[in-house]
Image (cartoon, rainbow, N blue to C red):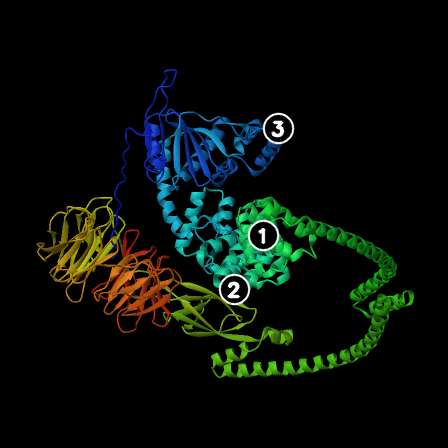
Amino acid sequence: MYPYSRSLPRSYTLPSTGGTNSSGPPVYRHPTMTGSGSPDMSSLNGHLEHFGLQELLQTLTHGARTGTLQIERDKEKVAIVFETGHITFVRTGAASQIRLRSILLRCDMVSESDLVKAREDQEKTGMLLGRALLERGVLDDKQLSQALRLKAEEELFDLFLWEHGTFEFFPDLIQTTPEDEINQVTRIQVDPMSVIIEGLRQADEWKIIRDRINDLRWILVPIEGAPAPAESHSIWKMIDGLHSIEDILKSSTVTRFDTCSILYRFIEEGIVREATVGELLQKAKGFVSKSPASALSLYQALIDRAGQSVGHELLEEAADCAAFLDPEAQSNFIRRAVEILKNRGDESGAWIRVQRLLVLSPGNMDDLKTAWTLRDQIPTRRVEIILDELLKYLRRAGDHRQMITVLRQSETLRSANASYWLQLGEVLRRCKDPEAEVCLQKAIQLSKKLQPEIALRAEKILRNLDPGLALDEQLVEQLRNQRDLLDSTKKRRKGLVIGSVGLVTLFIILHISAEWRAQGLLAAARKIEANGAELSGLLSAVEAYERVATEHPWTFAGSTGASEGNKLRKHIDDRRESEHHAREADLNNQRSNRIQKLTEIRSVISNARSLRKDGDAKAARSALDSLSSADLKILPEIELNSLQFPVLIRTKPSEARIYSRDRSFLGTSPVVVDLHLKENRQYIVERSGCRTTRVNLSGASSAVVTVSLVRGPLRTYSLPSPVSRSALSGNLLVTTGRDGKVRIVDAKQLHPVSEHSVGIEGHPAPLLVTQDGTVLVVPFAGRSVLIQSNGRVNPFGLTASSPFSAACSLNNGWAIGDVEGQVLHLDSAGKLKWEYQCASPISLVGSMNNGGLIVVDRSRFLHQLDSNGNQLRSITRLPGDAIQLFPDGRILLHDGTTWKSNEVTPGPAPSTETRNSGLKNFYGTEMGWVVLEKNRIKQYRTSSPPSCAPLEASGTSGGIWVASQDGILRLHQANGELNSEVELGSPAVNLHRSSQGRILVTLADGRLCDVEELQR
């Protein structure tokens, strides 16, 4: 049984003095005198975590304050203007904007065509949309004021969903501008108290909705076979498995809150589900070419949901998608993929992705640093390029320390290069590192003969560092002469190279000119060949190839043209001959196959008719079903029209009367009827106690058609108010609800016996605990009562000092827990035997087979007590919230996990309470129901989720009664076969088996039903 939990009222205090505190609770600033002697307006600021929006609006309203309240969360800002305690103006950011056009369309104030014309006027004149509609006469001032007020209220309702953020109240009003329509600005007078009431209501419901709809980028998919809802058809039609929740919100004509409420209801009713990760990934792949923005949004949703476990494959797919839309996002996705591969040790894979980054974001220093860390996987030539690029950008950024680190790491690559030591020496000199002298001397030593320019630069730097380190003037002069000699040699070589290149270029130009003309003719010939599927086209291609070979014999294209022309001509000759032989063989083969197939089909039909004549309808239908639709098309029309298919009509329950459409009695089920393939006949199925059913059949129907007949309850009784809990005491049914009444009903005759006031109206329904035919009624507040099987009602125990939250039977007495963490054990007379104190409110209590007690508090701590209230073992913290305690010490958690002594058995998450039947326990899930027996868990699926715990059928059949949320009570066999259905008309709250062998059903709408368990 679920415990009842209740949050304590919220309270706060405002200090009367103090300054602004950015991290603590909100603080008032009292007015101070300005230099002119006038008082300054008091201001209010703080955090929404400590001072909620409700309190802010109440404070400013009751104080009749005038000014601007600015609220900020992350990068989103909202400004609310107050004038003497009333809200007159609201400005929201782009993330929270609500379009005026949506309000006007939803309220049916304007048409789509009116908005289009007004938008044209707005573009021409620059006036606001509302003014344009007024000028056209589409709206009057009163309608526009109403629309603007609705728009402001919806913007304020969204603020109640902010769980964190900062706020500050300024005494100055903000001024509106002509661009306020674009910036989503409205100005109207709104009553803050009505906003608070509606905003809190929506906020409470939003918390429930967000448990199921927590990502607006996700896609909803209609469940196949689920019936369409009775209302909200416009929202239902938008759910097509292609559009995200955000798309539906943009297209909906109702508010975002109402739209999400409808979507939540659809999910709860089991007609809509969230797309799986696999389905969403397929949708994203399909949207890449059609709608890259939608695809990128889906990929981002998948990546956000995966969190730290995201794989590099998904990131790379998202990067490919972002290439169409946002190159920067593409680069970021690839960077995350590189980081994942590096963490896994796959440096070769990381280098492959880094190459893409170097192309997408050339010059990005972070990418170059990443590439440098992967240098062991990079070819040496490419490492040199990356090193030069990295050093160039580090030099521009002035990061000399990083340059030194990179240069030292590259010593193995360039230690024999004088320019490397010169570069390292220059950077070390900038950082005033004494090692610069050693590096510059190495540069001079390596470059004296072949690179005098480097030696001279290094010598100049050394001279500036310390004149004593400079080379002698004679050696410096030799280096300068050698540099001049090398420069002159380079110039001569450059002149020779330029001349040679000129001659070669002239020859190449002449040859290219001829080759270019020949290649053009060759390309034309190939195009003729590609387009010429027929022989005439191929012959034209041969002529074109021969022309290329004739006009340009000395070119590569001419040689190729001659070769391809010869091959094509031979191909044409071979093709002509093969086509002739193929046509003859195909005609003969088709004729032979058709005759053989027709003979086989007629043989099957003849055999089927013989079997039907002998009474074996099943074998006859099996023979006819072996014929495919292609086989039947071969038959002549007259034979096909004379062919009849036997169909077996079965019913559940059996022995139903079957009539033809003209009410001709055909027999009692099962019945076999013979139907033509294109014939469509209607049959009537009737049985006492069941609804009449009509079924349409044809020869194309399945061989066996099973008709399930739906029964109704034997009797129905309506209670004055809905039922929340019920329990059976002998022949009496005890029910409780939120009206504070306990009603006792005669289970035999379904008529009221008595009614008692237990608890307070509006409180949660009292708990019901049964023991040996006696029912203990434990209200949330007040005194408990004990109901005997003879109908006597007696007060029990003392009046609660704190609200009761859990109860169970224990050793011919009772155990009750309250929200103060106290557990009381009362004997059968209501006297206190012992008490036990926990540190948190009690969630669940349950008796054990050994006479002890299990207690779970709301901090998820498990307490195990003996029959005298003494603690048996140390307190243990459960891994999740407990929803049911079993006598053998097992505990069922909210996610379906069964826990016992730190041993965990996974299972489906429950959606209903549990029911015990011997060694078995039953509970409902979102997909069906579960049978829990010791450590074995078996799940069964149903077409509609259960509304209460299943009830095991009587006898040894192993059947299960399941009351579904669609208002149907179904009897399922152990093999999953549906055996019976009873229409209840409303979801069931609980199921009981009376002493007469019938099923007592308490319904959510306050009715009681008496259902015959065995069909007659």
Q: Tag 2: residue type?
A: Asp
CB within 8 Å, label 3 to label 2: no
Q: Looking at the figure, which quarter contains the C terminus?
A: bottom left
Q: Are marks 2 and 1 in contact (CB under 8 Å)?
A: no
For disc 3, the neighbor class at 10 Å (few under 14, some 14 to 19, many from 20) is few
Residue 449 x %, y %: 70, 57
Assign a secondary structure to mark 1. Answer: helix
Q: Which residue is mark 3?
A: 125
Residue 319 in view of the camera = yes
Name the residue at 40% across, 49% down.
Answer: 210
**Mark 2 residue crowding within 10 angstroms, few (<14) / some (14–19) / many (20+):** few
The answer to which of marks 2 and 1 sits earlier in the sequence is 2
User: Which residue was labeled with disc 2?
Assistant: 346
Please provide percent x and percent y for residue 104: 50, 36
Question: Which mark lies nearer to you, 1 or 3?
Answer: 1
Mark 1 and mark 3 lie on one chain; the one further toward the N terminus is 3
Residue at 57% in and 77% down:
627
Position of 741 with respect to 22 (left or right) is left
Q: Where does label 1 land, which residue? A: 424
Q: Is residue 76 left or right of residue 827?
A: right
Question: Which residue is at a point 86% across and 71% down the rendered structure image?
Answer: 562
Residue 355, image quadrant: bottom right
Cα–Cα gap, marks 1 and 3? 66 Å
Identify which residue, 625 or 39, lies in the foreground.
Answer: 39
In which quadrant of the rendered image does the N terminus lie? bottom left
Residue closest to the far top: 36
The disc placed on residue 123 is none
